[in-house]
């Protein structure tokens, strides 16, 4: 039964067990929703590539998202970040669609799993660090030495900067994961209250549930946006070194 | 009543399963590493494919569309500007033609009017001359007529009066004295007639 609010986050195998070199890579419900989200993105944006001067609705949606993300990137990371546009676009869309598909009842939220968000964040962190070292060489280490700091405080500041830099993937992944998990758990708890309080007292938690659904949709968009914009900010640090 | 029982039953079931499950698997399924590798594998696979397809096939098309639309719009604006300028030019030309035509028409009208007026004047003058001639002629004729008629009248008067006298008295009277009397009378009569 689905009374446990954490039950919705369970991962289970769909279909046969697939093992390569004794490593389990079976197709699970998480994989299913990753595939569904990716396919939805591809279908929607492929429909949006029609060549017409006056766009139809889907084309308008695709083009608006394109210019939205392109503006976000150029605002936060400057024109040097142009080559990374398609990565950030895919990232934003993937996180957004996974969050949004998670809002459908009885579905599964891919981004509510720490391992998924952590892999994304770690990939971004490693990629940004590599880009920084390629662009600036060892000069990238100046990132940890802010200018205009008194010599006495410098050792402390450098340590703090290094810790904050290294905690980036953790903060990035935990932010998304915790937001999604907390929201869905809360909705589940309120849904449980509706059932247990019955037709007399269940209206109040039902109202809360409805309001929470709206809030969660907002959070789903906002967290995808935050994830993408933080990636842009980290990219900005790597591309335009001015600390 | 039935509803209440059903709900209570449901609640009871919920509570039982809840406690049973929390006893069986407490904590977060997220921290269970059983499917971590699988999730990482499928994430890399789906996200990788998504990224490759988006960046290779879809996004270039969208950006291309945006670019072509932008350039097309600019082009259209340019041609529209050009056409507007041309239109303004044409309108100016048209205005000029209309003005010229107006002036020409006025001139033509004026000259024609002058011509007609002159013609009328000439015709009137000649007509007046003719009329004057006719009048003079008529007056002469009238004068002639007047003279002759007076003489005839006097003659008739003299003859009739001499005849009258002859019949009355049976005697011829001197014609000259008779005519003098008649002339005198007729003169008086004429003067009276003419209202002097």
Image (cartoon, coloured by chain):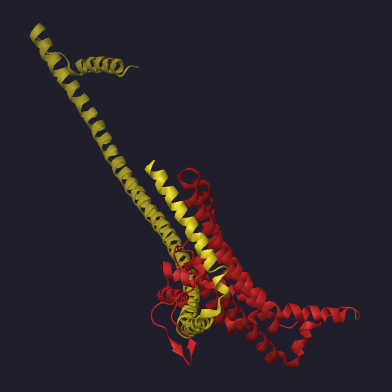
Chain colours: A red, B yellow
Residue B117 in view (yes/no): yes
The x and y percentages for residue A133 are: 70, 90
In depth, the one of B103 and A167 nearer the eye is: A167
Residue at 11 percent across and 11 percent down: it is B164
**Image quadrant assignment for residue A237:** bottom right
The x and y percentages for residue B35 are: 51, 79
The x and y percentages for residue A150 are: 90, 78
In depth, the one of B162 and B191 nearer the eye is: B191
Residue B158 horizontal side relative to residue B134, left or right: left
- Quarter holding the N terminus of chain A? bottom left
Residue A56 horizontal side relative to residue A88, left or right: left
**Vertical position of residue A44 compared to residue B185: above or below:** below
Residue A146 in view (yes/no): no
The x and y percentages for residue A61 are: 47, 69
Residue at 63 percent across and 86 percent down: it is A127
- Residue lying farthest to the right in this orientation: A152
In depth, the one of A49 and A201 nearer the eye is: A201
Residue at 20 percent across and 29 percent down: it is B148
- Quarter holding the C terminus of chain A? bottom right
**Vertical position of residue A15 compared to residue B164: above or below:** below
In depth, the one of A112 and B68 nearer the eye is: A112
Count of labels shown?
A: 0
């Amino acid at each position: 039964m689905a009374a446990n609010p954490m039950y919705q986050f369970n991962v289970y195998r769909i279909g046969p067990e697939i093992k390569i070199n004794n490593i389990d890579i079976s197709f699970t419900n998480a994989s299913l929703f990753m595939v569904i989200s990716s396919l939805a993105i591809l279908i929607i944006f492929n429909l949006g590539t029609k060549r017409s001067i006056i766009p139809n609705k889907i084309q308008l949606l695709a083009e608006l998202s394109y210019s939205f993300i392109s503006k976000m990137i150029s605002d936060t990371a400057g024109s040097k970040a142009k080559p990374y546009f398609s990565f950030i676009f895919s990232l934003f869309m993937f996180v957004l669609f996974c969050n949004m598909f998670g809002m459908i009842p009885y579905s599964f939220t891919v981004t509510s799993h720490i391992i998924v968000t952590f892999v994304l964040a770690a990939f971004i962190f490693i990629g940004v660090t590599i880009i920084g070292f390629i662009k600036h060489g060892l000069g990238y280490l100046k990132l940890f030495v802010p200018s205009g700091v008194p010599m006495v405080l410098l050792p402390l500041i450098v340590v703090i900067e290094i810790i904050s830099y290294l905690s980036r993937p953790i903060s990035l992944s935990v932010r998304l994961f915790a937001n999604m998990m907390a929201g869905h758990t809360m909705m589940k708890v309120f849904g449980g209250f509706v059932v247990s309080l019955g037709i007399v007292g269940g209206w109040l938690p039902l109202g809360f549930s409805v309001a929470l659904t709206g809030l969660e949709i907002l959070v789903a968009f906002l967290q995808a946006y935050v994830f993408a914009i933080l990636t842009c900010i980290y990219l900005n640090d790597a591309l335009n070194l001015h600390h | 009543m039935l509803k209440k029982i059903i709900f209570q039953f449901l609640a009871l079931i919920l509570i039982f399963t809840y406690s049973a499950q929390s006893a069986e698997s407490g904590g977060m399924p997220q921290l269970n590493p059983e499917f971590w590798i699988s999730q990482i594998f499928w994430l890399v696979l789906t996200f990788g494919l998504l990224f490759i397809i988006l960046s290779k096939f879809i996004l270039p098309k969208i950006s291309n569309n945006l670019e072509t639309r932008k350039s097309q719009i600019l082009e259209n604006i340019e041609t529209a500007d050009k056409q507007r300028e041309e239109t303004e030019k044409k309108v100016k030309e048209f205005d000029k033609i209309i003005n010229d035509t107006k002036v020409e028409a006025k001139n033509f009208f004026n000259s024609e009017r002058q011509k007609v007026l002159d013609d009328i004047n000439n015709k009137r003058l000649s007509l007046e001359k003719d009329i004057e001639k006719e009048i003079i002629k008529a007056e002469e004729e009238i004068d002639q007529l007047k003279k002759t008629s007076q003489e005839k009248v006097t003659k008739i008067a003299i003859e009739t009066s001499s005849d009258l006298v002859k019949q009355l008295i049976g005697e011829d009277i001197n014609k000259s004295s008779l005519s003098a009397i008649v002339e005198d009378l007729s003169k008086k009569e004429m003067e009276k007639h003419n209202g002097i």
